[in-house]
Image: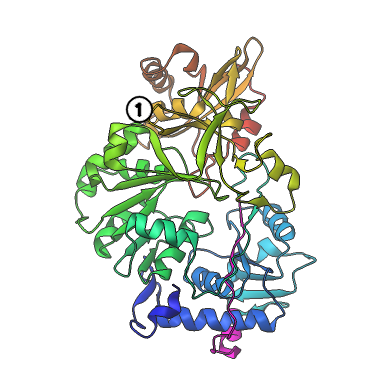
Amino acid sequence: MYPGAYVASTPDKPAVVMEDDSEILTYAQLEDRSVRLANAFADAGLRPGDVVALLTENSPRVFEVYWACLRSGLYLTAVNWHLAKPEVGYILADCGASALVVSDSLLPLVEGDFPALHTRIRIGGETTHEGHRDYEELLAASSPQPPAHQPRGGDMLYSSGTTGRPKGIKPVLPDRQVHEPGDPYVGVFGPLYGFDQNAVYLSPAPLYHAAPLRFGMIVTSLGGTVVVMPSFDAERAIRAIARYRVTHSQWVPTHFVRMLRLPVSVRGGFDLSSHAVAIHAAAPCPVEVKRRMIEWWGPILEEYYASTEGAGGTFVGSLEWLEHPGTVGKPMIGTPRICDDAGNEVPVGETGLIYFKRDDLPFTYHNAPEKTRSAQHPDHPTWTTVGDVGRLDEDGYLYLSDRKAFTIISGGVNIYPQEIEDALLTHPAVLDVAVIGVPDPEFGESVLAVVQLVASADASDETRASIAEFARERLAGFKVPRRIEFTDALPRTPTGKLVKGKLREEYGAAKV
């Protein structure tokens, strides 16, 4: 399905609602505006397989541009607008975008020449900018008639770049029209989570990220309503669930931590009875955090483990998770294989690199064949990994340990920071924490915890000692941080992933 399927029956139904009351986009408007933009792209010379880059804050324009690409056989590359100018420039050059749609406020990030870029479209702003077409004027001048041929497009998104430069993940476009069924995300997640025309889906995260963008596509494919937060705020998110009678939502563990830090009087002050499915992914969720969320919201939490690459996926509901705390579930897409550094499968219960076995290669990295090869198993090309480490139990449940690139090797022993972070995060003075390895003359590396405190806590030696003692009560001695530093804020992406490269730059030369 696609938005045009609902115009005849529910033209005035909201397809996208901004949580801050700034705008409502109906299905009739989404269909009309995406058709006009698709025609504008065609008039500008874009053809199936070309790339449109999008750089904008959370707004309904995201879905207009996305659906224009999806009905034109184009790739959409949604760019993280929190990136610095050189990082944005790298993605624009690497993806080879033929067209760029950019918010007026973000124009400074895209100054420069890009060989393939011939069409620039500006959203908003009261003044003209040389070389940029005005978005609204372009739509007004374009035909509202849907093209006879509307090949299905897709997205080519870039990895978060937490362990290096981001990689463009380029899928093979399907051989079908936009109105024909067959989208794998709609086919898997629609029935799995009960998305339909009655769904009201709250999206608190940036729409350039794979999950919010694709789940918004799923909801608008099935005739539901997407409620978009301009940015995440814990109390406003809970208020939105009650106000809009939200049925579905999607989160990352950092959101849960922020909401659990709210006063009990705030958390209990809203009617959340409409809330039926709370999906979470993107990062491992500390066991105690998830347990507390289930106690608060009930057994409505649904977790999946996957990646932008689409290499594979596991799924688990709340009741099943309570019987297997810490698991990210059993596979529904691909078959997990746990391997050592040489590519040999390890016994059940042992930790290793997670591969997913598929019948064919599910993705390639754009302009990076060597990175594609490094993601493949040395002996089985259709087994792929995104660099996560974990284990399988006897019942086939998958448990994550950490990213392979984040592993600390101290005295020859592998230490996984995620376990330490999960433990420290439950200390009452800790708002956020990152654990990294720093050089150690005796052990090679030692454990450093960088802690962001709650507002009421003091960055004192007493607090540091309390956190260290808290760790000793919960972790083996070699996992307890040798050093604890305080910071005002940790470098996280807006989707909750720690950018540990920045911490390593700051603390990498530290002596412990």
Q: Is residue 50 left or right of residue 335?
A: right
Q: Is residue 288 above or below residue 154?
A: above
Figure quadrant of the C terminus = top right
- x then y, percent, for residue 398: 44, 34
**Any part of residue 20 in sight:** no
Observer-nearest residue: 220 or 203?
A: 220
Q: Quadrant of residue 239?
A: bottom left
Q: Is residue 392 above or below residue 492?
A: above
- x then y, percent, for residue 341: 64, 26
Figure quadrant of the N terminus = bottom left
Q: What residue span does the magenta drawing correspond to? A: 135-158
Give the residue number, with chain letter if any, for mark 1: 427
Amino acid beneath label 1: His
Q: Residue furthest top?
A: 442
Observer-nearest residue: 150 or 465?
A: 150
Q: Residues within 10 Å of mark 1 (few under 14, many from 20)?
A: some
Q: Is residue 307 magenta?
A: no
Name the residue: 72% across, 78% down: 130
Q: Is residue 432 above or below residue 412?
A: below
The local secondary structure at tag 1 comes to: loop
- x then y, percent, for residue 374: 69, 39
Q: Is residue 142 magenta?
A: yes
**Any part of residue 147 in sight:** yes
- x then y, percent, for residue 333: 48, 47
Q: How many marks?
A: 1
Q: Is residue 192 left or right of residue 160?
A: left
Q: Is residue 153 above or below residue 439?
A: below
